[in-house]
């Protein structure tokens, strides 16, 4: 009977410890509007380490020096798109980096970064030195605090 009790106790401990090893996945969305740029970034982290950022950037037309993108032809829009991608340091062809530029009345740039899949040099070009960053430096909590210190509103 003692062996059965010990075995049962061991199984209970094993099952309870299995639940403790689960990863905690959290997301935060921050919005920042300044100097003619409107930005929304949703950061997803596992155990507080940011692994993915989905960002939308909408510059005011006056920031770019144009009244409306509706007036531009496809070739002119392509030039704006190439210029924006070049200023970000990406082509849109990189692994783990998705970029989309759409034109309506305004230009909308969508940038999705997967830190697990993206080339470290590309991420570094975008301002994320993940290869040399500690977990603390890649902390979701820290990123939210830094963004809020810069005037962002995070939820």
Image (spheres, rainbow, N blue to C red):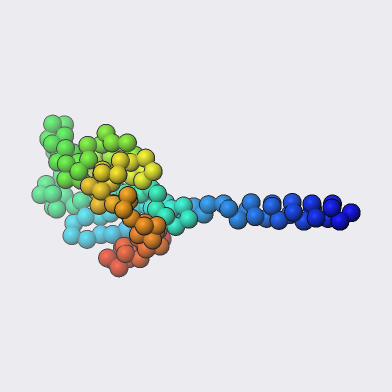
Residue reaching furthest to the bottom: 149
Q: Is residue 53 left or right of residue 17?
A: left
Task: Specify the farthest residue to the front.
Answer: 3
> Which residue does the image show at 16% across and 49% down from the upper left?
61
> Which residue shows up at 80% across the image and 55% down it?
6
Please say if 75 is above or below 59.
above
Q: How many marks?
A: 0
Residue 37 in the image, given as x and y percentages of width and height: 21, 55
Q: Is residue 152 above or below residue 101?
A: below
Which residue is more in the foreground, 79 or 122?
Answer: 122
Spot occupied by residue 22 in the image (x, y as percentages of width and height): 57, 52
Q: Position of residue 103 (x, y in %)?
A: 22, 40
Q: Quadrant of the N terminus?
A: bottom right
Residue 29 shows in this picture: no
Farthest-out residue, left = 65
Q: Is residue 123 left or right of 26 when viewed as pictured?
A: left
User: Which of the pair 76/89 is nearer the observer?
Assistant: 89
Residue at image location 32% in from the left, 49% down from the top: 131
Front position in the image: 43 or 31: 43
* 132 lies left or right of 34: right
Split into 4 quadrants, where in the image is the C terminus? bottom left
Camera sees residue 146: yes
The residue positioned 36% from the left and 46% from the top of the image is 115
x and y, in percent, of residue 104 in the image? 23, 41
The quarter holding residue 143 reads bottom left
Residue 33: quadrant of the picture = bottom left
């Amino acid at each position: 009977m003692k062996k059965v009790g010990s075995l049962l106790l061991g199984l209970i401990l094993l099952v309870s410890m299995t639940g403790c090893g689960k990863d905690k996945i959290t997301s935060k969305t921050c919005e920042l509007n300044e100097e003619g740029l409107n930005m929304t970034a949703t950061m997803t982290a596992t155990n507080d380490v940011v692994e993915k950022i989905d960002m939308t950037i909408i510059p005011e037309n006056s920031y770019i020096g144009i009244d409306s993108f509706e007036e531009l032809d496809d070739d002119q829009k392509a030039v704006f798109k190439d210029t924006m991608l070049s200023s970000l340091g990406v082509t849109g062809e990189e692994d783990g980096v998705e970029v989309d530029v759409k034109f309506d009345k305004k230009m909308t740039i969508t940038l999705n970064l997967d830190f697990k899949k993206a080339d470290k040099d590309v991420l570094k070009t975008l301002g994320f030195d993940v290869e040399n960053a500690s977990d603390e430096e890649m902390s979701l909590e820290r990123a939210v605090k830094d963004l809020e210190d810069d005037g962002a509103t995070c939820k």
